[in-house]
Image (cartoon, coloured by chain):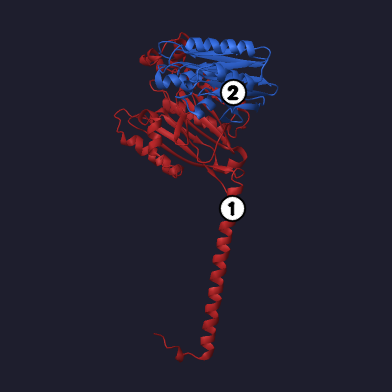
């Protein structure tokens, strides 16, 4: 116990005043903090649709069992997000052809040189990609090539561009969808069989049908692109990846591994270790850019 | 300008029990009849549907037409009728045959009644069997990538084929692009 009788009356008075002032300041702080919290919650609920979506971005870039890393990634400068949006791309050097790592690196370096891209100029952007492809063709004459997937996100909208068989995956409401189509002979075979009223089992039996009909390095390639953008919503997850990811981890498996409160870094880590855990003896290079759409209060 | 593309496939079933009807005059009308839930005589029901449609179309409102079908067709018969009207479309449906609209980068189900259209809207009408292996995001992405209705349909068929090699029962769909 303290013996306050030893203190002079003036000191006791000063202590009491200090205590009262402290209590007053503390209560004021609590009241102001609660008021701010209630107001912010109410505002964000009321204006939820008007608040901007922002991109939370992460990536992984792994070699697998191959000797060289033939995947290459590009992520546009994050400080230019407001003016030019986010561009993320993945290029995968084609197996069986020469200089895969050189070509895929050339593709992403060229994309970087051409940044910024106009969001609503899909045709123009597609011509830039065709130009890159033509340059590779002039140098290698089909002895080297790469695939390319690229997304361009601006506010709540996304355009995508694709050549070859890499992946642009959208995860929404616990369901993963491959947005782009693989440009291989299977597509042509399916059309023929379906038009003839047949089932399409034969199209998948022939392993040669997986051969690409278009890729970066082909002359006058046909870039698959959105002519109008897709509207994105909060918590959408976009994965731009090489096929090394989906070969070991099908879309349904990716979804079952992800927790929807994870940020982009957490999702990237989950997918990377998911692929690694498969211990595939012929694991291809596996790389991906993960983008999670979040609502911003700034 | 009106652009459309139809797809009909037996899908490994013994017979094709659906039917697609298209009328261009006086206004464009798309109708899909699905007899997959009918226990017997799907062909006769489909024929009846076709006859009512050709005799009454143009002279009756969509609601009146709907009432006639309700009276005459088997309760298990499913259908969708979509009629272009001015700057929009009118839609009535029964069962799981439905239409979806791609508009402003989003996809949504067309409700029964009138729906206003803008220039870049694309529509797909299909049976539930066609939609089953597809996700809305896949249908949307393909519409936004396609340069024509046939392109869009081919991409959707590829998606269905990737899931079941087109061995999933009757498949019936129409893709539409209307410049209103």
Instruction: State which chain disc 2 sits on.
Output: B
Q: Can residue B134 be seen in this view?
A: yes
In the shown orientation, is residue B161 left or right of residue A275? right
Number of callouts: 2
Residue located 32% across and 30% down the image: A65
Please name the residue that numbered disc 2 is placed on.
B92
Q: Which chain is red?
A: A
Please name the residue that numbered disc 1 is placed on.
A42
Q: Position of residue A287 (x, y in %)?
A: 42, 34
Q: Is residue A97 visible?
A: no
Q: Position of residue A135 (x, y in %)?
A: 53, 22
Q: Within 10 angstroms of label 1, few (less than 14), some, or many (20 or more) residues? A: few
Q: Within 10 angstroms of label 2, few (less than 14), some, or many (20 or more) residues? A: many
Q: Which residue lies furthest to the right in this view?
A: B86
In the shown orientation, is residue B16 left or right of residue B108? left
Q: Which chain is blue?
A: B
Q: Where is residue A27 in the image (x, y as percent from the top left)?
A: 55, 70
Q: Where is residue A15 in the image (x, y as percent from the top left)?
A: 51, 83
Residue located 60% across and 35% down the image: A116
Residue located 46% across and 44% down the image: A263
Helix, strand or loop at disc 1?
helix
Instruction: State which chain disc 1 sits on.
Output: A
In the shown orientation, is residue B87 left or right of residue B169? right
In the shown orientation, is residue A196 left or right of residue B176? left
Q: Which residue lies furthest to the top in this view?
A: A196
Name the residue nearer the viewer: A225 or B5.
B5
């Amino acid at each position: 116990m303290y013996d306050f009788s030893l203190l002079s009356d003036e000191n006791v008075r000063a202590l009491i005043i200090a205590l009262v002032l402290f209590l007053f300041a503390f209560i004021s702080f609590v009241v102001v903090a609660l008021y701010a919290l209630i107001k912010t919650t109410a505002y964000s609920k009321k204006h939820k649709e008007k608040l901007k979506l922002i991109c939370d971005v992460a990536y992984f870039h792994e070699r697998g069992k191959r000797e060289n890393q033939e995947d290459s990634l590009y992520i546009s400068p994050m400080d230019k997000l407001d003016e030019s949006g986010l561009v993320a791309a993945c290029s995968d050097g084609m197996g069986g052809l020469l200089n895969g790592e050189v070509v895929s690196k050339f593709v992403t370096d060229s994309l970087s040189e051409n940044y910024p891209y106009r969001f609503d100029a899909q045709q123009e952007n597609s011509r830039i990609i065709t130009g890159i492809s033509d340059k590779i063709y002039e140098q290698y004459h089909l002895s080297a090539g790469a695939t390319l997937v690229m997304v361009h996100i601006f506010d709540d909208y996304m355009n995508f561009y694709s050549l070859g068989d890499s992946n642009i995956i959208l995860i929404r409401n616990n369901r993963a969808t491959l947005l782009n189509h693989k440009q291989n002979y299977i597509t042509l075979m399916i059309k023929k069989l379906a038009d003839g009223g047949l089932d399409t089992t034969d199209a998948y039996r022939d392993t040669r049908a997986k051969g690409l009909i278009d890729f970066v390095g082909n002359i006058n390639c046909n870039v698959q692109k959105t002519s109008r953008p897709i509207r994105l919503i909060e918590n959408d997850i976009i994965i731009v990846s090489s096929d090394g990811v989906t070969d070991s981890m099908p879309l349904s498996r990716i979804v079952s591994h992800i927790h929807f409160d994870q940020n982009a870094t957490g999702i990237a880590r989950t997918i990377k270790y998911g692929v690694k855990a498969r211990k595939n003896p012929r694991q291809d290079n596996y790389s991906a850019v993960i983008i999670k759409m979040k609502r911003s209060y700034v | 300008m009106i652009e459309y593309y139809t797809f009909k496939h037996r899908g490994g079933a013994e017979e094709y029990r659906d039917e697609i009807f298209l009328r261009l005059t006086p206004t464009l009308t798309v109708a899909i009849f699905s007899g997959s839930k009918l226990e017997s005589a799907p062909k006769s029901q489909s024929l009846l549907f076709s006859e009512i449609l050709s005799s009454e179309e143009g002279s009756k409102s969509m609601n009146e037409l709907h009432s006639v079908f309700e009276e005459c067709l088997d309760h298990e018969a499913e259908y969708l009728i979509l009629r272009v009207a001015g700057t929009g479309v009118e839609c009535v449906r029964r069962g799981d045959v439905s239409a979806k609209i791609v508009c402003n980068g989003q996809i949504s189900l067309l409700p029964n009644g009138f729906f206003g259209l803008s220039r870049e809207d694309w529509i797909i009408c299909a049976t539930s069997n066609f939609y089953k292996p597809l996700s809305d995001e896949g249908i949307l992405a393909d519409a936004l990538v396609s340069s024509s209705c046939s392109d869009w349909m081919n991409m959707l068929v590829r998606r269905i084929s990737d899931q079941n090699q087109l061995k999933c029962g009757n498949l019936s769909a129409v893709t539409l692009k209307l410049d209103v």
